[in-house]
Image (tube, helix red, strand yellow):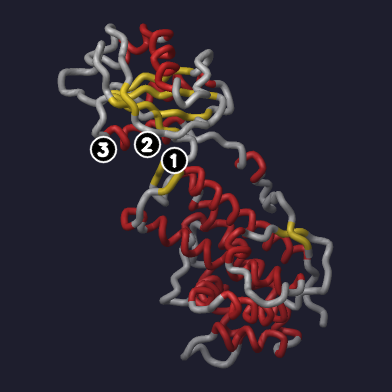
Amino acid sequence: MNPADHETVANGTDFGAFADEQIAPARLAAAIRGRLATSASELSGFWFQVRGDRADYARELQEHLAGNAVVVLIVRRAPFDNVNAVLDDFVVLLEENQEACEKYLTGDAATDRRAVVLLARNTLQLPQVSSPVRLPAWFPRLGGRTPSVIIEDLTWRAEAPLNTAEAAIGELCQLLFELEGALLDRLHSVCAQKKAETASFWDQVRREGDGPSFNDFLAGVRRARHEVRNSSSYRPSVREGSSLVARIWGKAQATSPDGLSRLGKSFARALALPESADTSWHRSIVAVLFRPSALPPSDQQAFATNILVTIGAVCQMITAAAHADAYPSYPVPLIRSMSFDLRQGLAGARRGLIALDHYTG
């Protein structure tokens, strides 16, 4: 079993397209409004890298910023490549777009914060420090003055709560539900034919009151899954422990990285993983970060441990998103990339399990 770089889930979802998605103008507009609301500066500059059509992006972003004293400009000729001349370039850009500045930056008498959004082909490769800049005489309400301005690059800093649409929580829930189904099929097949293979794993996830039979537990989980009406809202509970993924999540939470490696070994045995298989899977970044200090595990153990750690991380993310108001906001690219990586991990694990024949040991 060897990890692959790209995944396509069984239902045809192409994760490759997701990797190149641009932060939507509506999301960037929300981030800009949030920064303006807390800004102590009369004039702010926000830089943002656009990989696609900047004119279309600028038009849509300006629409989402309607009602705010914010103008969206496209960086074309001004280089912005010299730290000593960056604000000179800023003024040149304003002069080139006087009409747009006068249209969108006038605001009303109560508006004391203004912003210029600069859409560029690249990120801002300069220190982002506050400096005074002499504004043109025609500049709305601030003309001829020398306010202190900082141009902040929002390309990797536009923030959102953990339940933002870019987190794709519904897709995470659905993929988690589908992976659990594949795990149940495999574990039931192994347990029915050679129960001893599953004994060690069962001993580690069973709870008081479960009874001795792993097969009975699996059957109970199957019955509970029939009550799930919408897999995109599937949210396991560690406290209730009525699902297989909840048991895995709870065990993963309480286990050290070295312990997870040992748990992965018993899980690999319970899944009766072959020494090699013509299948691919994605090693999620959380599995790498929680790698054990011991010698590299076997392919089977690495695959099983990856499932355990990825399930735990997915459940944590789903739960955190459900309580997003209790946590800080984070950069949208970080949230989106984490979700993307976890979805690759879930989809790859399910695909790997489906590719295996029923246990015949």
Left-right relation of 112 to 235: left
Sequence-first tag of 3 and 1: 3
Q: Is residue 172 above or below residue 315?
A: above
Q: Is residue 223 visible?
A: no
Give the Cα separation between the discs numbered 3 and 1: 15 Å
Q: Quadrant of the N terminus?
A: bottom right
Label 1 sits on a secondary structure element that is loop
When asked about the image quadrant of residue 89, the answer is: top left
Sequence-first tag of 2 and 3: 2
Give the Cα separation between the discs numbered 2 and 3: 11 Å
Tell me which amino acid carries mark 1.
Arg
What x and y, as percent, mark residue 354? Answer: 73, 64
**Quick check: marks 2 and 1 in contact, CB under 8 Å?**
yes
Reading the image, the residue beneath label 2 is 31
Tell me which amino acid carries mark 2.
Ala
Q: Residue furthest left?
A: 109
Q: Residue at x 38, y 31 (%)?
A: 29
Q: Is residue 291 above or below residue 50?
A: below
What x and y, as percent, mark residue 167? Answer: 49, 49
Tell me which amino acid carries mark 3.
Thr
Which numbered dot is residue 157? 1
Q: Nearer the viewer, residue 195 or 141?
A: 141
Reading the image, the residue beneath label 3 is 38
Q: Nearer the viewer, residue 320 or 236?
A: 320
